[in-house]
Amino acid sequence: MSKFSRRKLIATGAAVAAGAAGLGVAAKLAKHYGLVPPDAGGLYGPGETLTYAAQRLMTRHSMAREFTRNQISATPFANEVAPLGEGFQRLQEGGFADWRLNVDGMVAHPMSLSLAEIKSFPSRTQITHLACEEGWSYIAEWKGVPLSHILELVGALPQVRYVVYRSIQPDWWESIDMADAMHPQTLVTHGMNGGELPVGFGGPLRLRVPRQLGYKSVKYITRMTVTDDVKQFGKGLGSSAPEGGYAWYAGI
Amino acid sequence: MSETLRPRHAALVRVTHWLTTLSFLALLVTGVEILISHPRFYWGETGNIRTSALFTIPIPTSRNTFHNGYGYTLPDQNGWSRYLHFQSAWVAVLTGVLYLGFGFFRGHFRRNLLPASSDLSVRGLSNVIGKHLRFKQSSEEEARSYNVLQRLTYLFVVFVLFPLVIWTGLAMSPAVASAIPGAVTLLGGQQSARTLHFFVSGFLVLFLSVHVLMVCLGGFRNRMRAMITGRGTLGHGAKDLEQA
């Protein structure tokens, strides 16, 4: 048995204390700069916080890769969703003329936008990659209104931090931070590959967040709530994904 | 029989060794869990069940998207597997940074892992390989440090396989791809990155298997003691074939 040297013991103790203090300071700083994700409470909180903080420092303004027309997948694929309810079917029969996107929360002018109004807004067309968390992917051309344009229309208040968005499908909702919400490639999408957005791919309206995995691109969106705190929504973890065991931040 | 315990591994090497072991095992188990949701591989930027596969692993899956010919699906463990995979990746990467700093600044790489140029000759290499093939016990002098094969293998794992597995993993991230697009295109696309991630992981598992086998052949208790307490015996006719 080797003897403990006092010097070694003191040095180790000091290093451990400095490490703990450093972690404490880092946690405070991360919180102050909004680098802690809403699902940071659990066992995997440290890893999620490191990922989200590192990527926010690295990718706040980075642009998702855009591809050329001939890179568009000839065979895109979308996972099936739970059967769409009666409400959806009624809207579909009417050609989605009565589809509405309600935008509320911490905004100066809450709005209820029709599909026609959204389509009349200045749009952006981009060819981006969509990867599912399962491992498969495709490239498609997406057409839609930058979410930032709608947030300017409704007059999002300066202190807001997240946009919560919901599907017409019950219990399907997500949220993104303002870095993604104000990002020019985050689109309220209504067109795909030159046509309308097919129902299978989320039509008539899907929020595409190309810098995150597919599950953040919620299909059939009907409501958006701008907020400074996601704790008041659902179980307070930021979206339905962590409630089902998946990470809130899906930029990986 | 008297045992002389000699210093074998520095404290930092031991701590980082076991942290890497833990995180690697967690990465392996969760990686397999993630893989079985879609055990189909592609080359290029995209791939899904409507495109042709590069190859498919013939195992049952955990998702309905792709049944792979089986009439049932395995329990879906993707949620916690993904959380733990990325948390373990952080542990592995931060441990690796610590180890690299130690290796470079305290001479660990130069002293213990860089082969002597004389050992790199065809004769030197075939000599060591021949000894391995005959399971010949190393002399006391030889057992005191890593032989040239061990040195080359460890250097390959530390400076080629680990960086590659991290790179190919990060290249699958849509956010990282937006920040460093070249990291993806250089690999041939995001599906190529996924395929390469699978193969590099396979090489790491191969290394782990041979490594554990050599520990057992070289004297399991002594090797484990050396990597835990930092001290181990040399020679004494023990089963010290080679250092693992």
Image (cartoon, coloured by chain):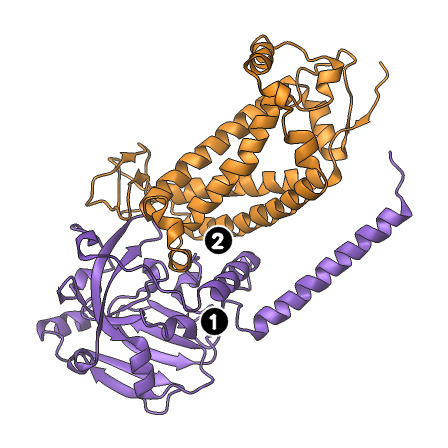
Q: Secondary structure at mark 2?
A: helix
**Residue B133 in view here:** yes
Q: Which residue is mark 1?
A: A236
Colour of the chain lettered A: purple
Q: B91 above or below B201?
A: below
Chain letter of the residue carrying label 1:
A
Residue B166 relative to residue A191: left or right: right
Q: Residues within 10 Å of mark 2 (few under 14, many from 20)?
A: many
Q: Quadrant where the N terminus of chain B lies?
A: top right
Q: Nearer the viewer, mark 1 or mark 2?
A: 2
Q: Secondary structure at mark 1?
A: loop
Instruction: Identify which residue, A11 or A166, lies in the foreground.
Output: A11
Q: B116 above or below A105?
A: above
Q: Residue at x 25, y 52 (%)?
A: A138
Q: Quadrant where the C terminus of chain B lies?
A: top right
Residue type marked 1: Gly
x and y percentages locating residue B45 in the rendered image: 29, 48
x and y percentages locating residue B215 in the rendered image: 63, 23
Q: What chain is the orange one?
A: B
Q: A201 above or below B233?
A: below
Q: Which residue is mark 2?
A: B83
Q: Residue at x 54, y 14 (%)?
A: B122
Per the rendering, the mark at residue B241 is none
Q: Residue at x 54, y 56 (%)?
A: A47
Instruction: Identify which residue, A77 or A139, lies in the foreground.
Output: A139
Residue type marked 2: Tyr
